[in-house]
């Protein structure tokens, strides 16, 4: 027997019982309703008719009595009108009763008797009002005489017959009411017994279903938890029969058997893949390691093991947790959490390690590892050894600094000689000689400015030449810088305005270097702002720092040149100062980077340019200071 058949057969008795109970309840309610309808339809109408017929009879009898009191023609007419009006009501109620004779055997005889009395009573009444007003014979017609009941006697007989009819219908209503109560009582008893039977039947069916269905399911769930939780693929499910649950148990056991085979083959394949992957990264000379989402090392080549001191994990034992250096913590976290790759492009983003007593420089790359569905599996970290390139870059910087320094001394002498000749201290000059010497002086000044900027760049790229930082008020920095360029701004008719807003936290800076950066930005703004324009300096709070803003209303920078404004020797075609070297903004960026800050540029041709220089807030202790 299938599971479906078993469930259906278990529920059939309950369904049949509930259907029978519903039908019986419907019939009982219909029967009770029929009883109540019989009360209203057969008896209540008769009771109402007899009650109103008695009322009309009382008023008819009153009209005879009023007529015997002789108070004039109006009184006589009123009595006659009362008789006619109430007789019509009498006739109407009699017709209702005549058409609503119930099943009581004597009611029909009583109605026939009432009909005879009604006709005689009406005849006597007409004769009564047919006599002259005040005639003594009216008394004879109204009161009983020997052998003649009179109007009053007929009145009493009609009252007796109508009262009997009223009694019969009231008794019928009471019997119908008692029958309805008995039916309701028996229905309640039947429903109570049915509820008790259902209450006993449902637990029995529930126990049967739990025993035959939930028992195997519970056993299967226990085995599934054992397999899924601890990988006990040797567990099997007991087979209780050949129904659907039995077939499911057989299929489940077959599945676990195949999984055992698959796990054995998969372990072999996984071991080969791990050995292959390990051999592959071992062939790289640079340190390479792979970490899982929790930071544990899964793969690492010998270079990474010796440099970082990590050990990869195996199938049975997890690897060590790698703690990246401070500069790589955020890139590694972003690669694992939001799958953002990290590939720096500048030497100042390189990391330094000591290996065998020697300082080595590595260029880091962090790449997230995803599965086909896009889920994060881990991250790969590659450290490219750039120690030789770093030394070459340092050699280049030192060479530029040395050559610039060596050129500065003779160039200063040449510049001095040119100034002496122009002052005609050693003799007069011809106009042509003066023109040539002025040109030589301008070129010497330009060359000296270039050498000064090259020396500044070289000093910035050597950390040992950076001075200690100290706390400075941002608004005071801007005011000091504005004071240095006021004369040049006034000559060009450009307004320089410092906006002092709410108090801001101090910034940790080298005041000389940051002053040089702000001076470069201000001089650039004045150079490219036409007469009547305005340069605005302001400061505002930002996340964990302060942003210095230098904004002008100058010619602006085309969008295609914005990405290159901080490149060395870059000059905007068509609008650059002829005497410029293209190093000013590059120096600004180097100074800001040395302060661990950031600088951005926003510009629109014809509307001006805004530089936003963000510096970290100063966090210091009494008697000391530190760089952020």
Image (cartoon, rainbow, N blue to C red):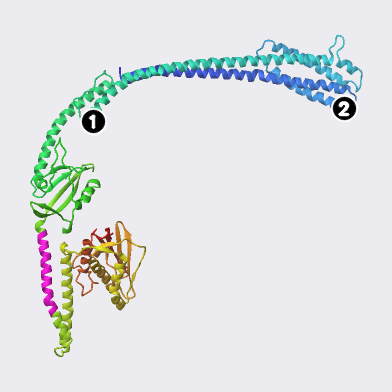
Q: Secondary structure at mark 2?
A: helix
Q: Which of 357/609 is in front? A: 357
Q: Which of 222/103 is in front? A: 222
**Disc 1 versus disc 2: nearer the observer:** 1
Residue on which the image places disc 1: 229
Can residue 5 be seen at all in this image of the molecule? no
Which quadrant does the N terminus fall into? top left
| Horizontal arrangement in the rendering, residue 314 relative to residue 79 (left or right) | left
Image coordinates of residue 47 in percent, x first then y, are 69, 19
Q: Main secondary structure of the magenta part?
A: helix
Q: Secondary structure at mark 1?
A: helix
Q: Find out whether residue 394 is within the magenta segment.
A: yes
Image coordinates of residue 167 in percent, x first then y, are 70, 14
Q: Which quadrant of the view contains residue 82? A: top right
Residue on which the image places disc 2: 75
Q: Find out whether residue 441 is within the magenta segment.
A: no
The stretch of residues the image draws in magenta is 390-413
State the CA–CA distance, disc 1 to disc 2. 112 Å
Residue at x 59% of width, y 14% of height: 179
């Amino acid at each position: 027997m299938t599971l479906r058949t078993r469930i259906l057969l278990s529920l059939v008795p309950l369904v049949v019982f509930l259907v029978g109970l519903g039908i019986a309840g419907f019939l009982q309610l219909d029967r009770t309703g029929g009883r109540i309808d019989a009360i209203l339809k057969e008896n209540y109408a008769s009771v109402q008719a007899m009650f109103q017929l008695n009322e009309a009879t009382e008023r008819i009898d009153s009209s005879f009595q009023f007529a015997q009191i002789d108070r004039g023609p109006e009184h006589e007419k009123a009595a006659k009108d009362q008789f006619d009006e109430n007789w019509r009501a009498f006739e109407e109620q009699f017709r209702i009763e005549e058409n609503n004779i119930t099943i009581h055997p004597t009611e029909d005889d009583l109605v026939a008797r009432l009909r005879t009395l009604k006709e005689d009573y009406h005849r006597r009444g007409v004769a009564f009002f047919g006599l002259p007003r005040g005639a003594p014979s009216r008394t004879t017609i109204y009161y009983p005489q020997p052998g003649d009941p009179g109007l009053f006697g007929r009145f009493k007989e009609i009252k007796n017959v109508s009262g009997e009819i009223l009694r019969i219908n009231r008794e019928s209503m009471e019997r119908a009411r008692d029958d309805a109560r008995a039916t309701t009582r028996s229905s309640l008893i039947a429903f109570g017994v049915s509820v008790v039977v259902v209450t006993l039947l449902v637990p029995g069916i529930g126990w049967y279903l739990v025993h035959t269905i939930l028992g195997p399911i519970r056993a299967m769930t226990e085995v599934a938890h054992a397999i899924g939780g601890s990988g006990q693929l040797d567990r099997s499910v007991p087979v209780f029969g050949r129904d659907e649950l039995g077939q499911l148990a057989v299929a489940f056991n077959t599945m676990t058997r195949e999984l055992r085979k698959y796990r054995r083959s998969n372990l072999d394949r996984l071991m080969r893949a791990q050995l292959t992957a390990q051999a592959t990264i071992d062939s790289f000379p640079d340190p390479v390691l792979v970490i899982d989402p929790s930071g544990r090392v899964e793969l690492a080549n010998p270079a990474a093991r010796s440099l970082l001191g990590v050990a990869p994990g195996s199938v049975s034992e997890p690897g060590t947790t790698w703690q990246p250096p401070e500069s790589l913590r955020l890139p590694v976290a972003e690669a694992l959490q939001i799958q953002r790759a990290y590939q720096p492009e500048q030497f100042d983003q390189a990391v330094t390690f000591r290996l065998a007593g020697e300082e080595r420089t590595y260029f880091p790359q962090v790449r997230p590892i995803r599965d086909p569905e896009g889920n994060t599996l881990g991250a790969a970290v590659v450290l490219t050894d750039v120690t030789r390139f770093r030394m070459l870059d340092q050699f280049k910087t030192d060479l530029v600094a040395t050559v610039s320094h060596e050129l500065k001394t003779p160039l200063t002498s040449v510049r001095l000689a040119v100034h002496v000749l122009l002052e005609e201290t050693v003799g007069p000059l011809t106009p042509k000689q003066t023109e040539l010497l002025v040109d030589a002086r301008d070129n010497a000044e330009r060359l000296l400015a270039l050498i000064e900027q090259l020396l500044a760049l070289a000093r910035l790229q050597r950390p040992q030449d950076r001075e200690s930082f100290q706390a400075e008020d941002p608004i005071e920095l801007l005011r000091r810088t504005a004071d240095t360029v006021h004369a040049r701004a006034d000559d060009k008719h450009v307004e320089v305005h410092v906006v002092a807003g709410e108090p801001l936290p101090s910034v940790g800076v080298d005041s000389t270097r940051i002053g040089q950066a702000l001076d470069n930005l201000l001089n650039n703004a004045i150079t490219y702002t036409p007469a009547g324009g305005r340069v605005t300096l302001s400061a505002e709070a930002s996340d964990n720092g302060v942003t210095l803003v230098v904004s002008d209303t100058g010619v602006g920078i085309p969008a295609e040149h914005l990405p290159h404004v901080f490149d060395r020797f870059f000059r905007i075609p068509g609008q650059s100062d002829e005497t410029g070297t293209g190093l000013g903004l590059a120096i600004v960026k180097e100074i800001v980077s040395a302060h661990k800050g950031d600088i951005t540029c926003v510009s629109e041709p014809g509307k001006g340019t805004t530089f936003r220089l963000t510096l970290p807030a100063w966090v210091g202790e009494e008697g000391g200071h530190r760089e952020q």
